[in-house]
Amino acid sequence: MSTIADNLGALAARIDSAAQACARDPASIQLLAVSKTKPAAAVREAYAAGIRHVGENYLQEALAKQEELTDLPLTWHFIGPIQSNKTRAIAEHFDWVHSVDRLKIAQRLSEQRPAGLPPLNICLQVNVSGEDSKSGCAAAELPALAAAVAALPGLRLRGLMAIPEPSDERAEQEAAFARLRTLQEGLGLGLDTLSMGMSHDLEAAIAQGATWVRIGTALFGARDYGRA
Ligand SMILES: *Cc1c(COP(=O)(O)O)cnc(C)c1O
């Protein structure tokens, strides 16, 4: 069985060659380790291998892991769906939120961000695949949402995030990521962040300008939801 350090080495090589293929500096692409369903011990192992940024989808699970890992200088990113009653704990315990898709949630995060902490880094999640079932704001609603979020004092709007409909076709993968990049450029807000690309499509995301790739399976191995 490969270790997390082995997996990280392989991922770094994938990121490097994807960056080279489009003449990007590999250092402009950051790796977010997505540890949902994985134990704190796996995050500790990832830290030892060089990981510094961790993404979690479920609040209770994330808080429990944070408790076990207080000795590590990790930066925590919330990347899952957000219910209103969870905003206070998210505002208190995370440095980034990638999955904001409506103003009410952004307003609560801003109000509830503790005064002693820097503004919470925010990505707006956009639905780039047009499926009704997926979360993310509609492209048409994005300019108004982005302008409103950019004005909130407790938040720092950094960019956009998407989870496109899975595809094995490189051209389809890139088309979805290109939509996100075009939307970001169209906002004209000087945003520096595109959170896009997962284990199966990080090359396409990097080709279209990803600055964070969010990687679970390729780093920690397959998830077993039955035991989570
Ligand atoms: C689970 C998850 C990931 C990681 O997915 P993998 O395919 O395991 O790399 C990335 N982003 C979000 C929002 C996720 O929920």
Image (spheres, rainbow, N blue to C red):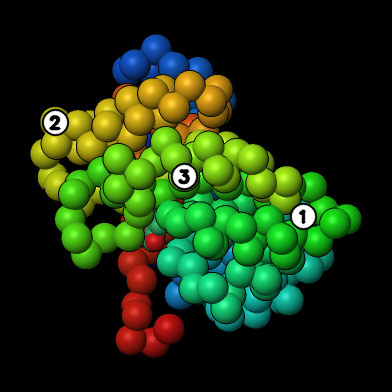
* Image location of residue 5, percent across then percent down: 53, 52
Disc ID at residue 73: 1
Q: Report the residue marked by disc 3.
A: 145
For numbered disc 3, what is the local secondary structure?
helix
* Image location of residue 51, percent across then percent down: 61, 49
Where is the C terminus found, in terms of image quarters? bottom left
Q: Residue at x 67, y 72 (%)?
A: 89
Quarter of the figure with residue 16 = top left
Sort mark 2 into few (<14), some (14-19) or many (20+) by Cα contacts within 10 Å: few
Sort mark 1 into few (<14), some (14-19) or many (20+) by Cα contacts within 10 Å: few
Give the spatial CA distance, label 2 vs label 1. Answer: 38 Å
* Image location of residue 26, percent across then percent down: 50, 24
Give the spatial CA distance, label 2 vs label 3. Answer: 29 Å
Q: Nearer the viewer, residue 79 or 128?
A: 128
**Residue 227, relative to residue 180: is it above or below?**
below
Q: Does the closest atom of ligand 1 sit within 8 Å of the Cβ of label 1?
A: no
Sort mark 3 into few (<14), some (14-19) or many (20+) by Cα contacts within 10 Å: some
Q: Report the residue marked by disc 2.
A: 171
Outermost residue to the bottom: 227
Give the quarter the ligand 1 occupies: bottom left
For numbered disc 2, what is the local secondary structure?
helix
Q: Nearer the viewer, mark 2 or mark 1?
A: 2
Quarter of the figure with residue 187 = top left
Which residue type does callout 2 highlight? Ala
